[in-house]
């Protein structure tokens, strides 16, 4: 482990300890950059060759222009490159011993890719790229075009047209989609990434729990919009980012009926939170180039209440059981559609009315990899649902269980989402999961 990585890990673990009191000990921008670059170098050295050989592609060409970056290229840029520069072309070539990393650009891409374009020799950038390809004579040239994954479809029409116009006919026959290579790069989490992911998920959990507390919510006064914008402001204050706008929803004992996912009979967005409400939040952050996506619940105690009503606790138990049913079926090689089908069949046998819409997470929030249902596609998702489960991948276990609550004379939905990892043998939650509904004011512990 290099000195920089060692320093970063010490800082991160110190942060985890101190955060139990207040979420302030977050890495400086400089230390974040060091950590990001060290992780990226490790991915290039140890992960990329394995993936290229697995997919049988010996040359991967990624072409992107400033302000219209390929999603894969963005994950390969060093921390001090916030975008491509003019046209940036990356070439990875497996020569049988190692993978060359070349940039057909005016300069090196940080310390990660060596610049291979001598403008004095070849003023045209495409000519420089063709020369690199011809000298290495690859068997297959992977390009980022894909029908099923936007993440792997970053080659634009113009770039494809200009590139192929320059490429000799014999080399054009070697062009293939790099879809599975791109997805593999994006979905695979390395040992170094998984060492810090629990801390990122914990940070996200603690922000969620802080928002679902009396510190933020005053029943009868605070609105759902107030809580949403508190989350946005909190993320900004902490120097973090979020990849989507949070949502805060209410279910309560009234005549409103559940319409569809996250839509409660056209309720106003700024609804006042009242005693007896069941709150649901959907929230995520981006930190150290990794994302979280979490949904949790809190119940606002009525006067005289000291715990969540039994019927709602039972509903939550069914939500947890649906999570177990799903993750128990994770197995290397199974497709997302197969896992979805098996899980829904078992849920039906147990009398659980479940809807499953689980997705990979990591470099993106809704990330590349096997899609395990969508809320409106419970019979399978063509394309991304056919993709198989691989080891060392991460998922947001997102689903809901519909449960009747007799006291409310209605059906509620326990909508859960927690981030977890699959190592090829077993599944685990990266920072645990919610197993009891929080109360406002807080009378129960934060059980994971």
Image (cartoon, grey):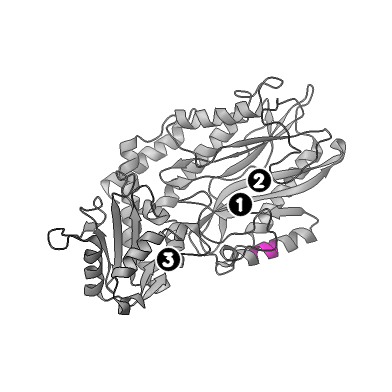
Crowd rating for badge 3 (residues with CA inside 10 Å; few <14, some 14–19, many 20+):
many
Q: Could you say which disc has been placed on residue 181 in the image?
A: 3
Q: Please tell me whether mark 3 sits on a helix, a strand or a loop.
A: helix
Q: Position of residue 366 (x, y in %)?
A: 53, 51
If you read the primary sequence from the N terminus, does the residue marked by circle 3 or circle 1 appear first?
3
Q: Position of residue 59 (x, y in %)?
A: 32, 70
If you read the primary sequence from the N terminus, does the residue marked by circle 1 or circle 2 appear first?
1
Q: Could you say which disc has been placed on residue 397 in the image?
A: 1
Disc 1 versus disc 2: distance between alpha carbons?
8 Å
Q: Position of residue 426 (x, y in %)?
A: 56, 60
- The answer to whether one can see residue 188 in this image is no
Q: Specify whether 303 is left or right of 376.
A: right
Q: Name which residue lies at 66% across and 25% down.
A: 223
Residue interval drawn in magenta: 339-343
Relative to 194, residue 239 above or below = above
Disc 3 versus disc 1: distance between alpha carbons?
24 Å
Quadrant of the frame with the C terminus: top right
Disc 3 versus disc 2: distance between alpha carbons?
31 Å
Q: Hey, which quadrant is residue 270 in on the image?
A: top right
Residue bearing the label numbered 2: 416
Nearest to the observer: residue 154 or residue 212:
154
Secondary structure of the magenta portion, mostly? helix
Marks 3 & 2, CB-CB < 8 Å contact: no
| In the image, residue 52 lies in the stretch drawn in magenta | no
Relative to 375, residue 29 above or below = above
């Amino acid at each position: 482990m290099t000195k920089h990585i060692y320093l970063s890990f010490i800082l991160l673990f110190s942060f985890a300890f101190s955060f139990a009191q207040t979420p302030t000990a977050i890495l400086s921008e400089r230390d974040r950059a060091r950590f990001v670059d060290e992780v990226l170098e490790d991915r290039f050295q140890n992960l990329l060759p394995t993936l290229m050989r697995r997919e049988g592609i010996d040359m991967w060409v990624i072409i992107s222009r400033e302000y219209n970056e390929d999603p894969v290229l963005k994950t390969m840029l060093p921390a001090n490159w916030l975008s491509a520069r003019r046209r940036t072309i990356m070439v990875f070539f497996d020569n049988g011993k190692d993978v060359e990393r070349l940039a057909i650009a005016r300069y090196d891409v940080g310390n990660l890719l060596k610049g291979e374009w001598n403008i004095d020799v070849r003023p045209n950038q495409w000519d420089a790229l063709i020369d690199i390809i011809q000298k290495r004579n690859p068997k297959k040239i992977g390009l980022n075009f894909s029908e099923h994954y936007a993440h792997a479809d970053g080659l634009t029409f113009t770039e494809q047209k200009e590139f192929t116009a320059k490429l000799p006919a014999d080399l054009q026959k070697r062009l293939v989609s790099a879809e599975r290579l791109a997805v593999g790069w994006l979905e695979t989490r390395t040992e170094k990434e998984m060492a810090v992911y629990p801390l990122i998920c914990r940070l996200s959990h603690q922000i969620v729990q802080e928002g679902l507390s009396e510190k933020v919510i005053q029943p009868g006064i605070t609105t759902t919009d107030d809580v949403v914008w508190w989350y946005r402001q909190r993320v900004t204050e902490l120097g973090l980012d979020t990849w989507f706008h949070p949502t805060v929803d209410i279910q309560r004992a009234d005549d409103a009926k559940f319409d569809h996912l996250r839509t409660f009979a056209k309720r106003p967005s700024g609804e006042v939170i009242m005693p007896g409400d069941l709150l649901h939040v959907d929230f995520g952050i981006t930190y150290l180039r990794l994302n979280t996506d979490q949904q949790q619940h809190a119940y606002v105690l009525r006067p005289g209440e000291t715990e969540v009503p039994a019927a709602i606790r039972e509903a939550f138990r069914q939500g947890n059981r649906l999570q177990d049913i799903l993750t128990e079926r994770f197995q290397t090689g199974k497709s997302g559609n197969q896992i979805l089908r098996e899980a829904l069949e078992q849920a039906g046998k147990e009398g659980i009315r479940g809807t499953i819409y689980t997705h990979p997470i990591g470099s993106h929030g809704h990330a590349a990899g096997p899609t395990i249902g969508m809320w409106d596609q419970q019979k399978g998702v063509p394309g991304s649902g056919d993709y198989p489960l691989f080891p060392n991948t991460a998922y947001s276990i997102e689903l809901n269980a519909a449960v009747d609550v007799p006291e409310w004379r209605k059906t509620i939905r326990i909508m859960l989402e927690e981030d977890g990892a699959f190592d090829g043998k077993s599944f685990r939650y990266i920072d645990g999961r919610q197993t009891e509904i929080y109360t406002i004011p807080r009378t129960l512990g934060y059980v994971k």
